[in-house]
Image: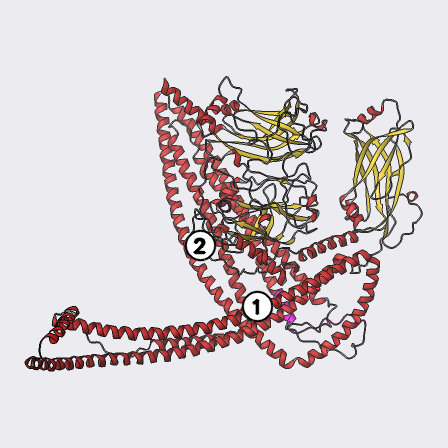
Amino acid sequence: MDITPARDTSITSGLDQSQGQAKRISNERQMIAKLDPLELQDRYLRLYDDHLVLKQHARKQEDKIKKLATKLTKVIEDKKRSDAIPLGAKLGARETETENLLEEYRNKISQLSEQNKLLKQRIVVAHQQLQAAQQMKKSPTMYDNVTSRIDTGQPKRMPSPLLHNLRVIGPRDSSRTSGTTPRINSALIEDARMANKQLEESLEKANQQLSANEQLIESLRQQLQQRDNEYEQNLLRLKAQTGGDSRTNLQENIDMIRLQRDLRDKSDELRRLQTQCTNFESQNRSLQVTNAELLKEIDRLDRQIKDEQQRAMQLRTELRTGSRSNTVIQELNAQIEDFRRECEVLKEANTKLVSSAFNGDREREFREKERALKLQIAQLEATIKADLGERGTLLDRLTLEKDTNRKTDEEQRTMHLKYLEMKEKHDDLAEKMRFFEKESGIDMKEIEEALIILRQRKQRQEPNFDFLQKVDDEKAQNLNRRVLDLESQLAETYNELEKTRNLLFMQYKINRDYKLEVDCVQKKMDENHAEYSSRILDSGQLLDIRADRIRKLEKALQDVAYGTRPYRVSSQPITDENLDNNLIEEAIELERGQNLIEIHISRASFNERALEFFGKNIEPSTFCSIEFFEHELQMTPIVKGRTPEYNFTAQYIVNVDDFLLYYLQKEYTIIELHQTVGQSFQTIAACKLSLKQLIEGTQGRLHGSAKLIASHQNNLDIGTFGAIEYWIRLRVPMEQAFRLLKEKMKAQGYLVTTSRQSTKTSDDIEQQREMNPNMNELTIAILNCANVKAATPDRQPDLYCIYKFYDFADHDTLTIPSSNNPNFDDRTQYPIPMDADLDRYLKQSQLTIFVFDDRDQKADRYVARADIPLISLSHDNPIRGTFDMHNDQGESNGTMDVTLKWTYSYLPPSSSTRTPAQRLKSTPTNEREPLALLPDESISGHKTIAERQREMNVRLTPHDVLEPDHEPRPRPGLPRNSSGLPSSSSSQPVRNGHQNYRQRTSSNASSQSKRVSFDNRDDDASTRYQNGDHPVHSETSGTVSPGSSDDVVNPSNATTPYVDDSEPDIIYQPSMSRNTKKGDDVVTIGVHDLILTDRCSVFDDENCEKVFVSVEFLDYPAEDLETPYALVKGTPNTKYSFNFQTDCSVRDQSKKQQLAELVEPKSSGEIKFVVVAEPPEDQPSLDCVDIGVATVNAKQLLHNQTDLIEERVDVYGMDDQTEVIGNMNVTVSIVQALNKVTRQGQNIRRIQT
């Protein structure tokens, strides 16, 4: 095979390709520049909408596949069931098909109804957009004379010299708008009309399809009834024909035929479902391929749009700098004059408002805040300067290091060349020696020995001239041989030089090509540098515009929050047509900011039980007292009779401020009914009047009747005592004042969220990292919530969030008042050691965030909750997304935007499973990805540099980290006596009181008033997320690797909740992962809550301060089976929430023996839950007292084969076992363990017999 030499053109061709690609990119950019930006944006949005539609279609296909899989499983189960049923039994298989059809039609109906709702919502939005566009087109704005600082695309309006010095300008002609807006508005209107037509057509189609489906359902029902009637008639006819033995044979044949027919139908259905599944899988694969292609196309178009936007921005900057300098200067001068005049007017108005609204204390507070903010700004500037200086020094050091590195490389290269030369010389000498040794067969040692012998002989003998002649001949021969060797070496060296020459020529070519490539890369780098510098300039301008907008919004918020914006209150008529004129007294002169509230009590009426209390034929003398706000009590005159008419009006002159509005919104006015007895009186009934409706849509008037409830002071067990008629009115309605209060509270909440500061610095983080390199930091950010509805639909909620992560204390956010879409912007950092417990927690648990309403009357009810799986964090993947929320009834209630991410790379322990990609990510990353602002995020989301540094670097010191308790209980063992009285014996050990474990960090001081009692007992959800089912809106990624956990849990490892003694019914349960796979060697015992009635003796004993529950089960110690904390004694019928649950292992043989003895006939089989009262901590000499006991019979549970799961049992007194003093919510899961123990006992007895 002939080999012809050819020139290597790979490098030049690569250069030509790169140049051709650059030309192609430039041509594409020119073509895109010719297009309209609106058209590009329209294409991008259409592609994005198509992508979303494909996503929805893929999800629908997945849902259909799941439904088909469930149907397939049902068919298989029906087939198995039909095989198991005997021949003579009746079969109901013919109804399964109709039931399936009905289910399909129901699903279709629900889908169509949802589509109908969505279309109606779109129609409403389209109408609103049309109305807004028409209003914007018609109504002129009050800031038309102010030019925008950015290019909006509208032509500038030339200032008129006639209107230059006018203070008031009337409405202008709306026809003098730019020529581009009508075109845009008409296009919008046409699009809206087309959308409306499409929506109406889709509505008509949906209605037609819905009616057709309903008719089809009715026809199927009629067919089903006809078939049933036919089958019954056939059966009756067959029964009448057959008789005796032939009847049984005929029945068996009929059953056999029916079974064969059902089997044939089921097999046909199975084949059809299999074919459908294969078709769906192929369609799904094709959809995935097309989706990937569309995503690539969208990315490419996105990059093109970004390039075009950059070019457009460059051109705009050039145009602005070249042509608009003079016009801008003139406009700015005019604006400066206008601003000066407005500033003077605003200063006068501000001085008046500040003198009337603020006092000296507030001014001092604001000055201190301003001083602190200025100091903070100076500190931030100093840190920025220090960072810049450090950056310069680091750059200098980097250049020096590069120079030294270059020098060392050159020295190393020269030394390597010298080494190669020496090596070549050594190799030449070694080859020569080897050649000489091969030819002569003599070793160097032999030659040296021969030379030594010859020298010795020369010294002994005389010279012999014949020998010298021989030596000369040998020398001549050696010289000839050496000449030949030198010639051969010369030829070899010539060949080597030729080779090196060729290599040097190739190296020269390669260096030349490299130089060309370096020049191209340098040019590209210069272009990129220029492009990025222009981007930085444009970004700086955009940031300045954004900062101006933020400052304007902050000023507006401050105006709303602190009352600096003037409001006009329309005058309201004082007359009331519903009231008599004789009830209205003379006019009272009110000062500015005052109002008059009148409370009138007309009459009272009593029921029969109240009249029995007064006595027969006795007319009682009664009067009423009114307690309102901060005023003194007002008394009605004493009236005698069974239906007293008081006709008393109490007038209160009040100052309309925040305190009054808060009182009217939250508090009640108390009216008490008193009876005179001689010279004294007694309170017999009372009622509360809610004034909330007075300021919400009633025009300042309220009329009605309230129920009188009997007072408990005189032990009246009557209940409802009667009713009282009243009316309340305001002289000046305060609807607008209440609306302004809501806006003010909302603005203050947003301002507080923007001014939060953290106390941790970056030095603490580095110190913590150096002390323990296994530490990491998790940032949990609750950004905002959307579409959260309150429990009552007629108001907006005051929302705040509470969650608990790992073994840290509960964290609650600030309260955002009167908002369905609150923007919390709450970020919290948790320093955590990366150990096996954390890894297990992340893989098996979820973060549950509860949303509460501060205005809700029920303190233990949450508005919504969001469950966030944490398994992605164990794979070092952040969690960002929108999660659905549900209320306490399981209904959907809004969404929540949450972000969870690590500061450093997460390193799982060695025992945990990791993927190879995660092992490569073991180096810590100090650079954190910035969070992108959401479209509806307010100004509180914009962080300063110091806040970003704190967000990146905040860590806790070691003593701030809450280490998990390794002790089973914080309460030591204390003596108890069951006599019902405190024991005064000093020989027994004394209770020291339970330890105080209340390390709770809260970001809001008002969180002490939030009464919460909840527990994360959603085991199904935790197992669902363990299997990899994530919410739909979650953007997490990572593979699920379920960890292996033991089936046996010691009772000492029970969850230890956090208790707050500030409220008697508050307890916070840590959301630790529970073992959902409990075998038959584990017994679960739980105490959830306790209610004690007034018959309990603990309320009469002053030496009993707290209450806890202890469980007596087998021989477990009392410390392991008692609630970890004692709750403060409250009033009767108070609910004490313990939320305590533990797992007791019965794997040992001794425990199994005791469990078997528990259900023997001789044993009572009772598991006791003893209610224990704890003495005060300042009296250590007193003992605990057993006040009640509740029992659960294990024999009865074994007989019924049912566990006791959160069931209420009665609590009986210790002194009187028949008296019920309360009830308790407990859990006893013991049936599986008892079944196993009984089976083992039966097997042993069978073997022995």
Q: What percent of the width, then of the height, locates residue 89?
A: 41, 27
Q: What percent of the width, then of the height, locates residue 374?
A: 71, 64
Would you place residue 523 above or below residue 128 in this image? below
Question: Would you name the residue on which mark 1 appears?
Answer: 390
- Residue 186 lies in the magenta stretch: yes
Residue 1083 in sight in this render: yes
- Residue 256 lies in the magenta stretch: no
How is colour applied across the structure in the image? secondary structure
Residue 204 in sight in this render: no
Within 10 Å of disc 1 (Cα), the crowding (few <14, some 14-19, many 20+) is few
Q: Amino acid at mark 2?
A: Gln
- Report the residue at 85% width, 39% height from top: 626
Within 10 Å of disc 2 (Cα), the crowding (few <14, some 14-19, many 20+) is some
> Which quadrant, please, contains the N terminus?
bottom left
- Residue 567, located in which quarter of the rendered image? bottom right
Q: Could you say which is closer to the camera, residue 483 or residue 749? A: 483
Q: What percent of the width, then of the height, locates residue 469?
A: 7, 82
Q: Which residues are magenta?
A: 165-188
Lateral position of residue 340 relative to residue 769, left or right: right
Question: Would you name the residue on which mark 2 appears?
Answer: 918
Sooner in the amino-acid sequence: mark 2 or mark 1 = 1
Give the alpha-carbon distance from disc 2 to disc 1, as whole Å. 33 Å
Badge 1 marks a residue whose secondary structure is helix
Badge 2 marks a residue whose secondary structure is helix
Q: Could you say which is closer to the camera, residue 262 or residue 556? A: 556
Lateral position of residue 1022 relative to residue 589, left or right: left
Q: Main secondary structure of the magenta part?
A: loop
- Residue 989, located in which quarter of the rendered image? top right
Would you place residue 1110 above or below residue 550 in this image? above
Q: What percent of the width, then of the height, locates residue 1057?
A: 59, 39
- Report the residue at 86% width, 50% height from top: 595
- Residue 485, located in which quarter of the rendered image? bottom left
